[in-house]
Image (cartoon, rainbow, N blue to C red):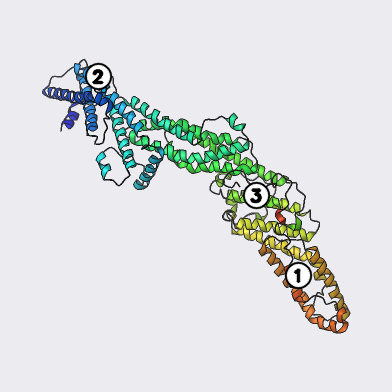
Amino acid sequence: MRNHFFKSLTPSHSPARTTPSHSPARTTPSHGLCESLMEENIEVAETLITKWDSASSSYADITPLFQDDRYEAKQYLKAVKDLQTAMDYFGTEHTNSQHLVRSQRLMQTAMKRLQREFHRILAENRTHLDPESISNRSSRNSVLTGNSDLEDDSEDDLRFANENVSEDERMSRSAIADLKSIAEGMISAGYGKECVKIYTVNRKSIVEEGLYNLGVAKTSYHHVHRMEWEVLEVKIKNWLNAVKIAVKTFFEAEKYLCDRVFWSSASIRESVFSEITKESALTLFGFPEMAVKSKKSPEKIFLILDLYEAIFNLWPDIESMFACESTASVRSLIDHSLTKIAESIRSMLVDFESHIQKDSSRTPVPGGGVHPLTRYVMNYIAFLSDYSGILPGIVADWPLMLHSPLPESFFGGNDSEENPLALRLAWLILVLLSKLDSKAEVYHDAPLSYIFLANNLEYIVVKVRTSNLKSVLGDEWIESHEAKVKQYASSYIRMGWSRVFLSLPENPMAEISPERARKHFHDFNIAFEEAYKHQASWIVMDSKLREHIKITLGKKLGTLYGEFYINYRARLENLYGNDSEVRFAPDDLGNYLSDLLHADGNSGGSVSSTSSLSSSPYHFHGGRHSG
């Protein structure tokens, strides 16, 4: 009832420490009663404040005010609040009153005590307020509440005893509640600046120490620019490990603490969080832009993509935490970094395309196997497709500069033209296919050049089908290029076995003279043996494609030769005996064909290109694809 009565009789107070201008004293009965109550407030406050004045009491000097039951601490805070009410009253009614002088002296003593307690709680509870514990609690609360509304953690400390929480969490909650109570008392008394200073110095050092332990430190562009790539690669990987911890643990914990300790003032919450984290955030997020300005070969792109992806994935948390005007420079820096990283990625893709086009290796792959350039480029493109969550945004406003219309097979379906990533990756594959066409010309044997093209295109199709490229390019792209592989296989059969087919009559069941039939068998034997020996070192790398070629060739050859064999074998053996020229049974042909196109299964990968691109076809430096 007394507090309610005070509020109804006293004017609204200001938290400032200065005394308001003098106004005439009033002498009404209610005025006298109010003054009496204010004097009582001062008396009660003086008793408690003096008791806990460490300058005059050895007990107070060594004993914390905020102990386990906190009853005394609550009484102390209430006395400070009532003292503030009395100061407001006498500051308005009697500016020269001894009561006002006395109240101001007591308030100064009380604030010193609260500053001491505030500092002690922060220091002694450092373990209980460590960022990892706080961020875990913050995450749990976010899940439980489903919103970001602030909790009033200091309503009743006794409620902690009934909660199913660990001792560490109970201590953490109690410390936060105590800090919040002290902060509210100091701010309302006009000592917010002192409270904030103690808090920011303590918590800022924790954030800075945490980032330093993660390997995050201030650096300059010139220092980064002079680094060897191997050193910079280690720095980037370390940053990638540190950034999520920094945001989701250190910054998130500080945001959570600020929001609760300074629950009563949104402006103070924002300024305190900014003071604690802004400098560290600028140091942390200033590194990526410096890193991407260094000279890099195209295969370093994956580490740069990891930089972009890390920031992109954390952006919602960053934007939420650093939403206030005082931290706008953090958001601006990160936004600028994303832009510069995206520019670097686009530049590296241009360099990659250029390297494909400039590859000058002229050494034919033995047996027409898969070219190292094909392996390198397709591994590269497949790895790019793993970043399908961020690459579309990076290449969206980056149109292809073409001098002629694209072939219809370039597009992977009706929606491909609307998919910027599909267009970009399909274009890179088209550049590779164009380069492979020119490399096929080094084979002076046309059938072998078709084996080479079939091998390499099949490798490309399989890589697309078995990687994330399938979801990017689509089934229609795969079907279109699979059909092209079969066209190459058909060209190989037609050209590689043309003399064998021509050695047989066009109609194997037509009646011809025995001598002419004998001549066909003779020509067939020579043509078949020559074709078999000539192709003994050729290879088809993919087992399914190899079987497809053998079945297709076997059916075509088996039909022609089998019918001719059945029609003339017996007659020729009766007429010519061992000189009949019938050397192969149809089954023999199948056995011979089964041995073709195997060669050495590793031959396609045993030859290294002389270009810088394909000199290391399986190794990418940095990023999650390194190794």
| Residue 205, percent from left and from top | 42, 30
Please tell me in which quadrant of the rendered image residue 537 appears.
bottom right
User: Disc 2 to disc 3, how far (Cα)?
Assistant: 77 Å
Q: Are marks 2 and 1 in contact (CB under 8 Å)?
A: no
Q: Are marks 1 and 3 in contact (CB under 8 Å)?
A: no
Task: Count the labels in the image.
Answer: 3
Residue that carries the numbered disc 1 in the rendered image? 592
Image quadrant containing the N terminus? top left
Residue that carries the numbered disc 2 in the rendered image? 105
Q: Amino acid at mark 1?
A: Tyr
Q: Amino acid at mark 2?
A: Arg
Q: Farthest top residue?
A: 96
Residue that carries the numbered disc 3 in the rendered image? 618
Residue name at image x 85 percent, y 72 percent: 523
Please tell me in which quadrant of the rendered image residue 47 appears.
top left
The answer to whether residue 14 is visible is no
